[in-house]
Image (cartoon, rainbow, N blue to C red):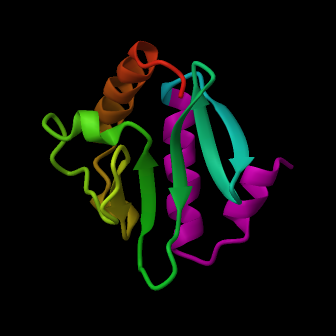
Amino acid sequence: MKPAEEHILRQPEPYQSIMLYVRSVIMKTLNVEEKYSYKLPFYYYNKKSFVFLNVLKGTDYVDVVFMDGALLEAEFPELQDANNRKRVRSIQIKNLEELDELRFVELLKSASKIKLKTKKI
């Protein structure tokens, strides 16, 4: 088993189910590489860090963080800047029922187009 998958399976419910579902949508939508970086599941697109999953201490949601999310805010107002971050934006998922899979797939595809245009930092 891969370290990223092990990390997800160690999470308590409902975080585990949310992360497994989000992971499956990411992996079936795009050709991504799953890695375990900074003790978190990261997904790389076009060899660039693209999105990662996190459960912040003291919160009750899974933070799905887009590395260049600031460039997507106009098109996807559901992206939030939870920690006053420069580039990254995220969606917070408290339960699977609140995740609109079609909208999430749109977000993934738009974010992947941006990743193809941006230079590796």
Residue at 70 percent of width and 49 percent of height? 37
Residue at 46 percent of width and 65 percent of height? 62
Q: Main secondary structure of the magenta part?
A: helix
Compared with 120, 63 (above or below) is below
Which of 30 and 65 lies nearest the eye of the viewer?
A: 65
Which of 62 and 21 lies nearest the eye of the viewer?
A: 62
Residue at 31 percent of width and 65 percent of height? 82
Q: Is residue 26 magenta?
A: yes
Instruction: Locate residue 71: give its quadrant.
Output: top left
Residue 74 pos. (x, y %): 13, 37
Compared with 99, 70 (above or below) is above
Left or right, residue 91 beside residue 46: left
Residue at 51 percent of width and 37 percent of height? 26
Residue 104 pos. (x, y %): 33, 40
Residue sticking out furthest to the right: 1
Compared with 53, 71 (above or below) is above
Left or right, residue 106 beside residue 1: left
Residue 21 pos. (x, y %): 52, 51
Compared with 86, 7 (above or below) is below
Instruction: Locate residue 84: give its quadrant.
Output: bottom left
- The residue stretch that appears in magenta: 1-28
Instruction: Locate residue 114: give its quadrant.
Output: top left
